[in-house]
Image: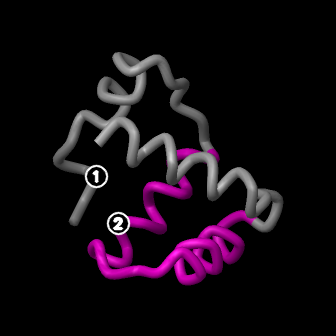
Amino acid sequence: MSHQKLDYEGILRRSGHRVTLQRVVILDAVCMGQGRSTLGQVAADVRRADSTIALSTVYRTLKAFADVG
């Protein structure tokens, strides 16, 4: 799975969400797992990419992604 082929910014904005650097980092982590990552793996990948992103941000962002589809 790759978000490079999707208009993820447009999808998020149309659904009322802002596109932030943190959300892009989390989306990158999700896409690295090609849809097979556990929450723990996504969180670990996010922390490696940016240690300032809190686990609660990962949870909220993944919920937002799920809500948007």
* Image point (21%, 66%), residue name: 1
Q: Does 7 appear above or below 16?
A: below
Q: Residues within 10 Å of mark 2 (few under 14, many from 20)?
A: some
Which amino acid is tagged 1?
His
Q: Which residues are magenta?
A: 22-50
Tell me which amino acid carries mark 2: Cys
Q: Are marks 2 and 1 in contact (CB under 8 Å)?
A: yes
Q: Position of residue 28 (x, y in %)?
A: 44, 61
Residue 16: x and y in percent read 47, 17
| Residue located at (62% from left, 47% from top) | 60
Which SS does the magenta portion mostly show? Answer: helix
How would you rate the neighbour count of disc 1 (Cα within 10 Å): few for under 14, some for 14-19, many for 20 or more?
some
Q: Residue at x 37, y 74 (%)?
A: 32
Q: Which secondary structure lies at badge 2?
A: helix
Give x and y (percent) for residue 51: 79, 67
Q: Position of residue 56 (x, y in %)?
A: 75, 55
- Residue visible at 79% across and 59% down in the picture: 54
Left-right relation of 47 to 54: left
Quadrant of the image containing the C terminus: top left
- Give me the disc on residue 31: 2
Q: Which mark is residue 3?
A: 1
Q: Is residue 29 magenta?
A: yes
